[in-house]
Image (spheres, rainbow, N blue to C red):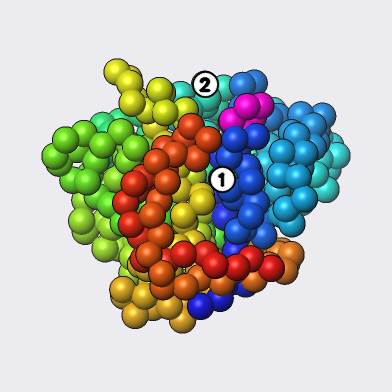
Amino acid sequence: MQLNAPLDMHLHLRDEEMLHAIAKGSAHTFSAAIIMPNLVPPVSTKEAVTAYKQRILSAIGDENFTPYMTLFFKPSYDKAFLESVRDDITAIKLYPAGITTNSEGGVSGFDVEELRPALSAMAELNIPLCVHGETNGFVMDREAEFVSIYEKLATAFPKLKIIMEHITTKESVAALDKYENLYATITVHHLLITLDDVAGGMLQPHLFCKPIAKRPEDRDALLKVALSAHPKVMFGSDSAPHPKHAKEACGCAAGVFTAPIALQLLAELFETHNALDNLQAFISGNAENIYDITAAQKTVTLEKVPFMVPADYNGVVPMYANQKIAYTVTEVK
Ligand SMILES: [Zn+2]
């Protein structure tokens, strides 16, 4: 089977040594990706975003890949600033303060009036807002609790495109159809695992991520909209590399590394559910429509030939390391 112009609408490429270790893994099989801005310090100026883009381009070498850059949302962004960066970015990412890796400078409290200047300007300039939607509540309830904040933002800023990132719950899925301006990304790991796979037996650090994998009925809700390529959902891997020692540690960092095997896993999943015809829309077409972008041409051929997932990619342990998966990428043009 072939996929055209695969897009990863939520990707962590990190920086420095890690960027060089993993960036080509995404750049080889994907046409483009939305690049998360949660570096230290976060990417929040025009200079920072253009410099980070250059570092990514030099790390990927001659791969044909577009990094769609993002800024780390700050309520202080004004219209003049946003106009000045409009051509350098594809979206802006909002993190609630302290909720995930390097999100300390994020938003705490979601006062509509405090957010109005920045979010109104974004709506006017047609800059989508990507949101890590979790409260500081009990870990299994954080995303469902955040849905009321999504609803508040969607109502207050009806012209703003709001992307609910890496959704994991049936509550978020339900919100998609209630508000015209709410969209979502879904990871491959949240389509495959539940909390049982993470902590039901021996603890699996390489499956530990935020938002944590949820209940079977949540995964079923995600599968329903992903496998049918619901027009408001798109693939975003949230592939989040950490060095092996940071995962296999007392105090395991959150993040699942899937980028080099994401297309293979999706092909297997969609085939298992007789939904291969919808994979192209989930992996590319929906994102092009939602973001109003045209991805660079790239054709990825996958064959149903078992692939042994390596123990690590330059020191980063992927999901399903040392296990066989059903599909292999056999050609990229
Ligand atoms: Zn992420």
Q: Is residue 165 magenta?
A: no
Measure the C-alpha gap from mark 1 to mark 2.
19 Å
Query: Can residue 150 be seen at all in this image of the molecule?
Result: no
Q: Position of residue 242 (x, y in %)?
A: 47, 30
The quarter of the displayed image where residue 325 is located: bottom left
Which span is picked out in magenta?
A: 15-19
Indicate which disc, 1 or 2, sits on the residue closer to the N terminus. Answer: 1
Residue 135 picture location, percent across and down: 38, 34
Q: Rate crowding at label 2 as few (under 14), some (14 to 19) or many (20 or more) other CA atoms within 10 Å.
A: some
Q: At 50% across and 70% down in the image, what residue appears?
A: 302
Q: Nearer the viewer, residue 291 or 308?
A: 308
Q: What is the x, y in percent for residue 163?
A: 54, 52
- The residue pinned by badge 2 equals 104
Q: x%, y% of residue 152?
A: 47, 46
Between 8 and 131, which is closer to the camera in this rendering?
A: 8
Q: Main secondary structure of the magenta part?
A: helix
Q: Nearer the viewer, residue 180 or 304?
A: 304
Q: Is residue 60 left or right of residue 156?
A: right
The residue singled out by tag 1 in the image is 11
Q: In the rendered structure, which amino acid carries the disc numbered 1?
A: Leu
